[in-house]
Amino acid sequence: MRWITAAGTVLAAVAALAGGVNSGSAEAAAPPVRTQHVEYFPGPRAEPRQVAVPASGRVSRDGPSLAGTTPAVKALQRSGPVSGRLDLVVMGDGYTADEQGEFAADAEEKLDAIFDVEPYRSYRGLFNIWLVDTVSHDSGVSGDPGADAVKDTALGSSFFCDGIERLLCVDTDEVARYAGLAPDADIVFVIANSAKYGGAGYSAADLPAGSAFHGVATMSSDNDRSYLIGAHELGHSIGHLADEYQYTGYGTYPSAEEPAAANLTIHRDVGATKWYRWLGTQDPSGSVVGTYEGGGYYEAGIYRPTETSIMRSLASTDFNVVGREAMIAGFYADADALTSSLPTTRPIGQGRLITVCLAPLTGLADVELTWYVDDRQVLAATGDQSVTPRELGVRGRGHKVTATVTDLSTAIRDPAVRAAATTSLTWAVR
C-alpha cells in the first residue's frame, strides 16, 4: 500500500531538526521518531485517506494498566482449533471495570454487523473470536466530543489524532500486549467507547516488532456506520486487496509492473485482466464487471473491476465479486474447513475410527467431503464424518486414507483459489 505522507520524509525532517540543536553532542541528539501509516475515514460514506502519524510510544498511565491486572479473555465464538481458524481478537477502550458488560454487548453488535457483509457472513465459521477485557480508568475516549477532551484509557484511543478529527488512533504497543493474552491473534479490532464517527486501520508493517497479527482496525462503538471500517480493513489484511479509490491530481500509475492485488490491473483490455473470468457479471455492488479507470490512488493507467465497492468508498457496503473471491482465498490461507483431533503423524489400525470436523460454513460456501484410499475415491463414503479404514475397504498394511474437503462455491472461479480452498488430511494405515 502506498501512503500519501512517506515515513521517510517525516523521519528526515525530525533528524534534521535534531541535528540543528547541539549537533556536536551525541547526548543531546533526539531519538528518531517512530511513525505509523494509518488509513482513516473522513465520514460515514466517504472515500478513505492515508497519513503517516507519530507512534504514541506511551507505555504508562495514571490509571490501570496491563501490568497491574489480569484481563479476562473470553471466547465469543470458538468454531474450531486455533491452528485451523482465523483468530480475531476484539478489545474495548474507554470502558471502566463496571462497563465491561457494555463492551461485550457493543463488540457483539459490531461484529454481527461486519459478519453480515459477504463473504464474511458465509465464512464466519472459519473464525474464532476472542474478547479481551481492557479496563480503563475513565469512561469514553480522548477527542470526544472535542479536541480538548482527554481521557485516561487502557489503549490510549484518541480522535483528532495528528489533528485529524475522524482519525481514531491507539497505542499499538499496548494493543499488542493485550492481544498476546488471547490464545492466538491473526487480526485485532479495537472498539472505542464513543458515539462519534471515526476509526483507523494499521497495516502489519507498522505494528510493533514481533506482532504476530496482520493488522489492527479501530472503530467507535455507538455509530451505526463505523462497522464498515472493520469490514474494509479486513479487505486489506485478509484479502490483500488494494484500495480502489483515487486522489485528484495524483496522476498516472507510474509502473509497468502489474499490481499484486487481485482488484487492480494495468491492463485496459478486458481479456487481459486477472479477473477476466468475471467479465460481464452483474456485480452486487451495482455495476457490471469490466475495467474502470482509476484506483490505487491514481487517476489513470490503472483499472478496477467495478464502478464502486467497499474498497473504494464506504458508501458501498459490498465487496465486488473479485474482492469476494480474494477474501475467500485469504480465509483459506489462514484457516481450514477440515480438521480432526486424530493426529496424522502416527499410523493407525484398520479398525481405528477416524472422525473429522467441518467448519460451519453457510451461504456462498459449498463444501464437499470425500474419502480416498491410496488416491482412489470411495464414493460410498462421501459426506461421512466418521469412518474406519476397514469400512473404506482397507485390507492389509501399507495403505493410506485421505479425507478431503473442497469448497465448490460459485463465488470461486479461479482454479488457484479453488485449490487453496481444498484441505486434505492423510493417515497411514499399519
Image: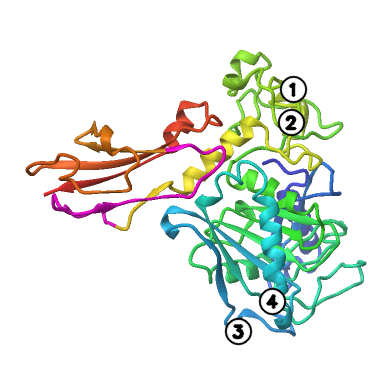
| Secondary structure type for disc 3 | loop
Of residues 378 and 308, the one nearer the viewer is 378
Calculate the distance from the C-alpha at mark 3 to the C-alpha at mark 1.
52 Å
Secondary structure state at the residue bearing disc 4? helix
Please tell me how crowded label 3 is: few (under 14), some (14-19), or many (20+) other residues with Cα within 10 Å.
few
As drawn, 23 above or below 187: below
* Label drawn at residue 295: 2
The answer to which of marks 4 and 3 sits earlier in the sequence is 3
Give how far across and how far down residue 312 sits, in percent.
76, 37
Q: Residue 289 appears in which quarter of the rendering?
A: top right
Q: Which residues are magenta?
A: 342-367
Of residues 4 and 105, the one nearer the viewer is 105
Quadrant position of the N terminus in the picture: top right
Whether residue 217 appears in this view of the structure is no
Label number found at residue 292:
1
Q: Circles 1 and 2: CB distance less than 8 Å?
A: yes
